[in-house]
Image: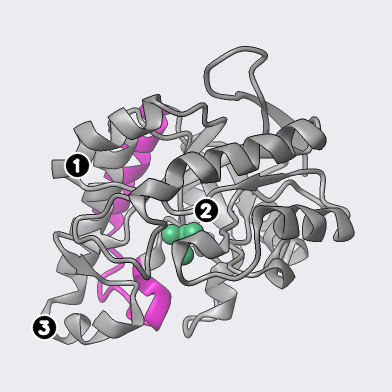
């Protein structure tokens, strides 16, 4: 319940409030086991100042979080949430390699240049077949995992955010996705932000989580907080869902002593 929160944003991205220090203070106040700051990496299929920090801000972001990591040893981690898009994989890798991130969340918020999770673009759901949307989305998530760039795959069924459900359930596509995730040993997150969105449901939903469990994947917890009040949001419900899906442990990230990504350990739920 006081799981570390590995998915949090700061005001730099243009659609959140609070500094990294505010987020850390909120995590302390909520008695969480730790916090990772994971603001949006400034690289998108279609650049948008309301969606990520500006490229020139990345250095200051890294320095700000590293200072907190130093003053809160063992409590704060430097993360980032990166949008995965095929054409940008090389550039994403370059940006990730030139900074000492403890972990990276790989997320898909765009199908080609359609930012489907942005409220400005919801009409796009009426212009496409919903199962085709889900199919493209899952395919891209599998590509993201196989890119090897990411520690965690973010919000596995984000496409449902506005309440659009697959017509057929897409069991074969989900089997394929889980097999791909399993081969890469990427972690998946239980992200409580969905509870604050029209879908009113945690990402991913129970049946996907059961599949993740059957595939032997590890889980982390993330609130996707965009303001300090949301840090650790509904983690009791997240833990309950994890147990319901058959999990008995969750992954925790232990920062490496030298350069390189954090090591993964497991703790009882
Ligand atoms: Zn955001
Ligand atoms: Fe996201
Ligand atoms: Fe996020
Ligand atoms: Zn997110």
The mark that comes first in sequence, 1 or 3, is: 1
Residue 82 appears in the figure: no
**What range of the chain is rendered magenta?**
159-184
Q: Nearer the viewer, mark 2 or mark 3?
A: 3
Q: Pinpoint residue 249: horizontal percent, then vertical percent.
A: 71, 38
Residue at screen point 29% across, 37% down: 92
In the picture, measured across the screen, residue 220 lies left or right of residue 156, that is right
Tell me the number on the disc at residue 126: none
Which quadrant would the N terminus be assigned to in this image? bottom right
**In the image, is residue 111 part of the stretch drawn in magenta?**
no
Q: Nearer the viewer, mark 1 or mark 3?
A: 1
**In the image, is residue 160 part of the stretch drawn in magenta?**
yes
Please, what secondary structure does the residue beneath circle 2 have? Answer: helix
Residue at screen point 79% across, 61% down: 26
Q: CA distance from mark 1 to mark 2?
A: 29 Å
Tell me the number on the disc at residue 209: 2
Magenta stretch: dominant SS? helix
CA neighbours of label 2 inside 10 A, class few (<14), some (14 to 19), many (20+): many
In the picture, measured across the screen, residue 158 lies left or right of residue 213, that is left
Q: Name the one closer to the observer, 92 or 56.
A: 56
CA neighbours of label 1 inside 10 A, class few (<14), some (14 to 19), many (20+): few
Residue 63 appears in the figure: yes
Q: Pinpoint residue 70: horizontal percent, then vertical percent.
A: 75, 31
Q: CA distance from mark 2 to mark 3?
A: 29 Å
The mark that comes first in sequence, 1 or 2, is: 1
The mark that comes first in sequence, 2 or 3, is: 3
Q: Which residue is mark 1?
A: 88
Q: Which residue is mark 3?
A: 127
Please, what secondary structure does the residue beneath circle 3 have? Answer: helix
């Amino acid at each position: 319940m006081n799981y570390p929160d590995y998915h949090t944003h700061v005001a730099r991205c243009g659609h959140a409030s609070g500094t990294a220090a505010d987020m850390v203070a909120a995590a302390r106040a909520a008695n969480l086991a730790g916090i990772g700051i994971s603001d949006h990496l400034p690289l998108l299929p279609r650049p948008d100042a309301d969606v990520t920090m500006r490229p020139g801000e990345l250095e200051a972001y890294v320095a700000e979080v590293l200072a907190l990591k130093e003053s809160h040893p063992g409590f704060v981690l430097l993360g980032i949430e990166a949008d995965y898009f095929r054409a940008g994989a090389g550039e994403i890798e370059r940006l990730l390699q030139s900074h000492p991130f403890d972990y990276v969340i790989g997320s898909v918020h765009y199908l080609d240049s359609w930012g489907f999770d942005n409220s400005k673009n919801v009409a796009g759901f009426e212009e496409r077949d919903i199962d085709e949307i889900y199919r493209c989305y899952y395919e891209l998530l599998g590509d993201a995992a196989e890119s090897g760039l990411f520690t965690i795959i973010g919000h596995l069924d984000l496409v449902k955010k506005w309440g659009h459900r697959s017509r057929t359930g897409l069991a074969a596509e989900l089997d394929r996705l889980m097999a791909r995730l399993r081969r890469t040993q990427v972690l998946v997150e239980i992200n409580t932000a969905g509870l604050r969105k029209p879908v009113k449901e945690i990402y991913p939903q129970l049946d996907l989580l059961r599949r993740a469990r059957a595939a032997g994947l590890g889980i982390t917890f993330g609130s996707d907080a965009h303001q300090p009040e949301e840090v650790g949001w509904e983690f009791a419900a997240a833990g309950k869902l994890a147990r319901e899906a058959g999990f008995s442990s969750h992954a925790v990230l232990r920062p490496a002593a030298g350069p390189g990504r954090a090591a993964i350990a497991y703790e009882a739920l």
